[in-house]
Amino acid sequence: MKKRYIIISLILITFSFQSCFVAKKYQTPGINMDDQYRNVSTTDSATLALMPWKELFTDKKLNSLIEEALSSNLDLLMAVERVNTAEAYYKQGKMGYLPTLNLSANGANYELSDNSLNGIAAGGNGSNYENYQLNASVSWEADIWGKIRSSKRAYQASYLQSEASKRTIESTLVANISSAYFHLLAIDAQVNVAKKTVKTRKESFLTMKSLKEAGQVTEAAVKQTEAQLYSTKILLLNLEQNVVLLENTISLFLGRNAGNISRGNLEDQQISTELKTGFPVQLLRNRPDVMLAEYELINAFELTNVARSNFYPSFSVNANAGLESVNFDDWFNSGSIFSNIIGNLVQPVFNSRRIRTRYEAAKAGQREARFNFEKALLTASKEVSDAMYSYKMERDQYQIRLKELQALTDAVSYSEELLNNGYGNTTYLEVLTARGNALSSEIEAIGSKFAQMNAIVELYLALGGGWKK
């Protein structure tokens, strides 16, 4: 009866203590955010971030590369394993309310020294005895101050943090693959331009040699044309090198050995989707790195709760029951049953300042996490503004470069016409200059087209796109 009263009393005390929960509840901190992005005017919450990448990018070969990367990229696979690790700890944290139960069985044979204290007490003469024990022990700590609850929430935040980290890698991977793919297409286009230019400059070199033999141009004109041919060949070699390096980079993203990358061409790349940004506050739920920073803050907040609870008394219950006998034959009868139950109430008094140090360190970690969260939001907002402005500038520059290219192409045509009509002694340098300017303009126009496409990718990444299915 006494044991029953003890158990009932402990249960009542426990539930009354649990009503004294003192751990604070997390709330998203109020951070001052503008209603609009700089250089962007929006009136609704529609955002590019909500669009799946399969709908944003229409190139089937690009989408195939992204799918392959999302299934085999090594950074992403490592992130998945980190999620699995965090999930295992989270499952453990959810079990914190339950008691621990251990079972043990042992048998021993003791031979005492005749001259030892235990041997003399046992009567000497080489006392020998056996002991057999089957034991079940239960230990349970009451969550009086919310320590276990806060620990569970900290584990949950850590798990969600690993999930957000994986999403960040997914989003970044989609952007990196797309950017590298568009860059590769742009260099392909530049390689084609350089090859055509090498061919035409070989023809021009032969023409200049003929004109020189006819006395229409000097040897200097021939050498200038020859040098221009060599500079174009060098440009072509550099571009072809960049193609190989980019293919190797994309192969690494795909988690495979370096090799050729199947691809389309730059002229077919069109992104007709309206580039909507929504409002800055939406970054809290769209940008995985911002979510990661908040989960880090939640984790630090809950660990501060745990550290605070260490100042207060802890209450635990330990119970043991089993069978014990010095004779094996009597081990499993009713006379061998034993049991005990112990309630512990412990209040820390002096512990070399360890508890206060842990609490102060947890508070500092929480403040640091708060600053990191705020920085993540500010950085995200800045990146959206940067990407949107870059897109507008690159779009306008591309249109201007096309006009520049047309003007320089016309200049080449006019200069060559003058040269072919007998004005070579005065215009061959103009021809060479016009050709060089036209080539540079065409290369830069292709680069500007890529920059425009890349700005869309950067905007998509900045808004938090790429990880939603």
Image: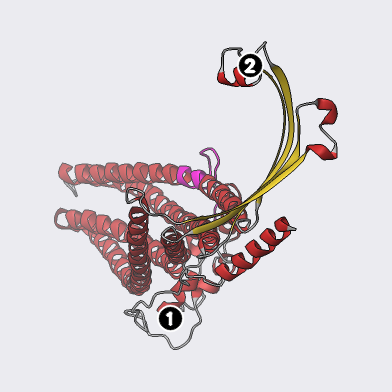
Labels 1 & 2 near each other (Cβ < 8 A):
no
Relative vertical location of residue 136 with respect to residue 11 in this rendering, above or below: above
In-image side of 327 versus 156 (left or right): right
* Label ID, residue 28: none
Q: In the figure, is residue 276 to the left or right of 410? A: right
First in residue order: circle 1 vs circle 2: 2
Which residue, given by chain and number where applicable, does mark 1 sit on?
279
Q: Name the foreground residue: 53 vs 183.
A: 53
| Image location (x, y in percent) of residue 300 | 42, 61
Kind of element beneath mark 2: loop
Secondary structure at numbered mark 1 = loop
Q: On the image, which quarter does residue 405 sit in?
A: bottom left
Q: CA distance from mark 1 to mark 2?
A: 82 Å
Place of residue 438 in the rendered image (x, y in percent of width and height, measured from the top left): 29, 60
In the rendered structure, does residue 433 fall within the stretch colored magenta?
no
The N terminus, quarter of image: bottom right
Reply yes or no: does residue 255 show up in magenta: yes
The image's colouring method is secondary structure
Q: Is residue 25 visible?
A: yes
Relative placement, left or right, of 381 versus 181 is: left
Q: Compare residues 27 and 344 and report the one nearer the observer.
A: 344
Residue 447 is drawn in which quadrant? bottom left
Where, by quadrant of the figure, is residue 107 drawn?
top right
On the image, the x and y values in percent for residue 71 come to 61, 50
Density class for disc 2 (Cα within 10 Å; few <14, some 14-19, many ≥20) is some
**Over which residues does the magenta segment extend?**
248-264
Q: What amino acid type is highlighted by mark number 2?
A: Leu
Q: Residue at x 45, y 54 (%)?
A: 180
Q: Is residue 380 above or below residue 431?
A: below
Report which residue position mark 2 lands on: 112
Pointer 1: residues within 10 angstroms few (<14), some, or many (20+)? many
